Amino acid sequence: MRNLLHVATASLLALSTLGCSTTLSPEGFRVVEADEKMVSECDFIGSVEGGSGIGGMSQETGMQNAKNQAIEAAADRGATHIVIDNITGGYAPYVNGRAYRC
C-alpha cells in the first residue's frame, strides 16, 4: 500500500507539470514578435534561444515555454523586437531567433 501511495504521488507530480506553461515578465510582454521587414531599420543585438524539457504529448506547451524563454532572453538584452528563425517541437522543444532594438 505504501509503495502504491509513492507511485500515485509521483504520477500526480509528473502530470501536474504537463499543462504548465511559463508566462512572460512585463519586459518580455513588451518585446514584439516581428518579421524581416519590421526590423530592417533596427539595430541587431544578437541571437537568442530558448528550450524546454516539456515535449511529447505536451509539445505545444513546451514550444510556448521555449519561445517565452527566447523572448525573455531578448528582453534581458534590451531588445524591443524578436524575429523567430526556428521552432522545433518533439520531446525537447527549441527556439532560436534574433533580437533587435528599434
Image (spheres, rainbow, N blue to C red):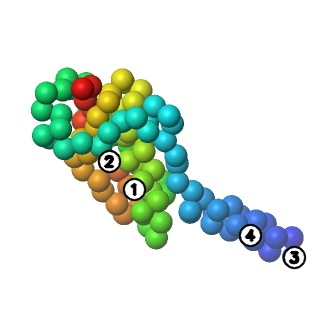
What residue is at 30 percent from the left and 43 percent from the top?
33
The residue where tag 2 is placed is 95
What is the distance, in whole Å, between disc 1 and disc 4 at their CAs?
28 Å
Vertical comparison of 26 with 95: above or below: above
Circle nearer the N terminus (1, 4) = 4
The residue where tag 1 is placed is 63
Question: In this rendering, would 46 be left or right of 3?
Answer: left
Can you give x and y, in whole percent of width and height, for residue 4 in the image? 80, 74
Viewer-side label of 4, 2: 2
Question: In this rendering, would 65 be left or right of 88?
Answer: right
* Residue 1, disc: 3
What residue is at 45 percent from the left and 50 percent from the top?
65
Foreground residue among 8 and 72: 72
Asked whether the beta carbons under mark 1 and mark 2 sit within 8 Å of each other, the answer is yes
Question: In this rendering, would 41 be left or right of 88?
Answer: left
Q: Is mark 2 on a helix, strand or loop?
A: strand
Report whether residue 97 is seen. no
What is the distance, in whole Å, between disc 1 and disc 2 at their CAs?
8 Å
Can you give x and y, in whole percent of width and height, for residue 35 in the image? 19, 44
What is the distance, in whole Å, between disc 4 and disc 2 at their CAs?
34 Å
Q: Is mark 4 on a helix, strand or loop?
A: helix
What is the distance, in whole Å, between disc 4 and disc 3 at their CAs?
10 Å
The residue where tag 4 is placed is 7
Q: Quick one: label 3, few (<14), some, or many (20+) residues within 10 Å? A: few
Vertical comparison of 66 with 62: above or below: above
Circle nearer the N terminus (4, 2) = 4
Question: In this rendering, would 100 be left or right of 56?
Answer: left
Q: What element carries label 3?
A: loop
